[in-house]
Amino acid sequence: MYELRGVTKRYTRGKETVHALDGVDLTIPDGDRLVIQGPTGGGKSTLLQMLGALDRPTSGEVVLDGTDLAGLPEAKLTRVRSENIGFVFQSFNLIPTLTAQENVETALVPLGVKPGERRERAAEALRSVGLGERLGHLPGELSGGQQQRVAIARALVKQPKVLLADEPTGNLDESTRDEIMDVLERLWNEHGLTFVMVTHDSAIARKAPRLATIRKGRITVTEKTGA
């Protein structure tokens, strides 16, 4: 479970101080599916970076399973990210010279998984997202939707507790967007993940059981009965 307590993040931009997050309090239970919406510059991606231990708050606590991420040394933070948190981004972030299977394997290297097991687990992860016939393809030989499926497989191959997605359908057409959301929702159900997603897409937000709206660094959470 995540507990954010009084989380503030300030940036200096020239002579201006930007309050990206302004005293955010938020609880995200295990197995939750939370969608975050809000205007550009409102703090959505900053909040996701805090949840993913990619950045530290200026003040406040980001607690995951009883551990304050903000207080951990960098080496331990890296371990938390490697073991417990999967990331999916709008831009896929695949290595163009590696095959789909090799891209997925990269998530297991920091965990010390042996090569044979890496290959087996990567292949299984790709099969789980419908790419069992594309293991040897390079990213340039795959469609945008297929590349995002590879990115999802890479995020989940290490069996994380948390999946964080930053605009994962932002570069996709409407039909492919729906396919990717179906994959993400199925995997969320199958693996019991805590799933937090940032999106500008109102069609996705309407289907979320919990919706967090963030504006000027302040957050409001709406529970949707029956969603």
Image (spheres, rainbow, N blue to C red):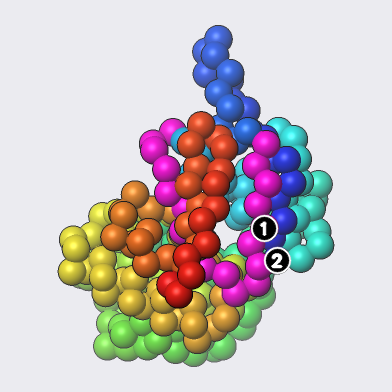
**Residue 102 in view (yes/no):** no
Above or below, 140 against 212 in this view is below
The answer to whether the residues at label 1 and label 2 have Cβ atoms under 8 Å apart is yes
Q: Residue at x 42, y 65 (%)?
A: 208
| Residue type, mark 2 in image | Met
* Of residues 104 and 160, the one drawn nearer to the viewer in this rendering: 160
What is the residue that sits farthest to the front in this orientation? 225
Q: Which mark is residue 1?
A: 2
SS at mark 1 in the image: strand
Q: Is residue 49 magenta?
A: no
Q: Residues within 10 Å of mark 2 (few under 14, many from 20)?
A: some
- Quarter of the N terminus within the rendering: bottom right
Cα–Cα gap, marks 1 and 2: 7 Å
Residue 206 seen anywhere in this rendered image of the structure: yes
Residue pictured at 73% horizontal, 61% vertical: 64
Above or below 214: residue 116 = below
Q: Compared with residue 131, is residue 14 higher up or lower down, i.e. above or below?
A: above
Find residue 32 and report its horizontal and vertical position in percent: 57, 70
* Residue at horizontal 55 percent and vertical 23 percent from the top: 18
State the image coordinates of residue 161 (x, y, percent, origin top left).
62, 73
Q: Judge whether residue 33 is colored magenta.
A: yes
In front of the other: 3 or 78: 3
Q: In this picture, which residue range is highlighted in magenta? A: 23-41
Q: Where is residue 91 drawn, in percent x and y?
A: 34, 53
Residue highlighted by disc 1: 27
